[in-house]
Amino acid sequence: MIPKALRSFVYQLQPATEKGQLSWSEADGLAYFCDHKNHTLHISSHFDEDRGVSSFYFRIVTNGKSTPFSVRDFDEDFETMRALYEAVIANANDVGSDIEDFFD
């Protein structure tokens, strides 16, 4: 679940990411990071095949302090994290410019 102290922050990330106010990069196949001011954000996706549970892991690193949390598919915030994760992927891949000429 998204911690209460971070809820407003996380809810602002998706629109800021979609507007291009933040720049995300791929760390590896399912993980992405964003360096912004003195903060580094990490988001990744995981599927536990043994339990059949999907999760998103999120971490904020500021001034050497790491604040991680996870959201599992049975948590109320799961769809919020899924939407953020998908916006992050599109941002990291710069998909908007990739498809600009698709219909030309």
Image (tube, rainbow, N blue to C red):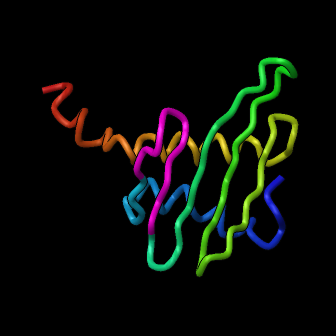
Residue at 55 percent across and 55 percent down: it is 14
Q: Quadrant of the C terminus?
A: top left
Relative placement, left or right, of 89 versus 44 is left
- Looking at the picture, how far across and down is residue 93, in whole percent? 35, 40
Seen as rendered, the residue at the extreme left is 104
Q: Quadrant of residue 52?
A: top right
Q: Main secondary structure of the magenta part?
A: strand
Please tell me whether residue 79 is drawn above or below residue 2 in the rendered image: above
Relative placement, left or right, of 21 versus 61 is left
Q: Which residues are magenta?
A: 25-35
- Looking at the picture, how far across and down is residue 59, in whole percent? 66, 59
Residue at 56 percent across and 61 percent down: it is 41
- Looking at the picture, how far across and down is residue 86, in whole percent? 53, 39
Please tell me whether residue 101 is drawn above or below residue 4 in the rendered image: above
100 in magenta: no
Name the one closer to the observer, 78 or 39: 39
Relative placement, left or right, of 28 versus 81 is left
Residue at 42 percent across and 63 percent down: it is 22
Name the one closer to the observer, 99 or 39: 39
Number of numbered callouts drawn: 0
Please tell me whether residue 6 is drawn above or below residue 42 in the rendered image: below
Q: Quadrant of residue 90?
A: top left
Seen as rendered, the residue at the extreme front is 64
- Looking at the picture, how far across and down is residue 94, in whole percent? 31, 44
31 in magenta: yes
Residue at 67 percent across and 46 percent down: it is 81
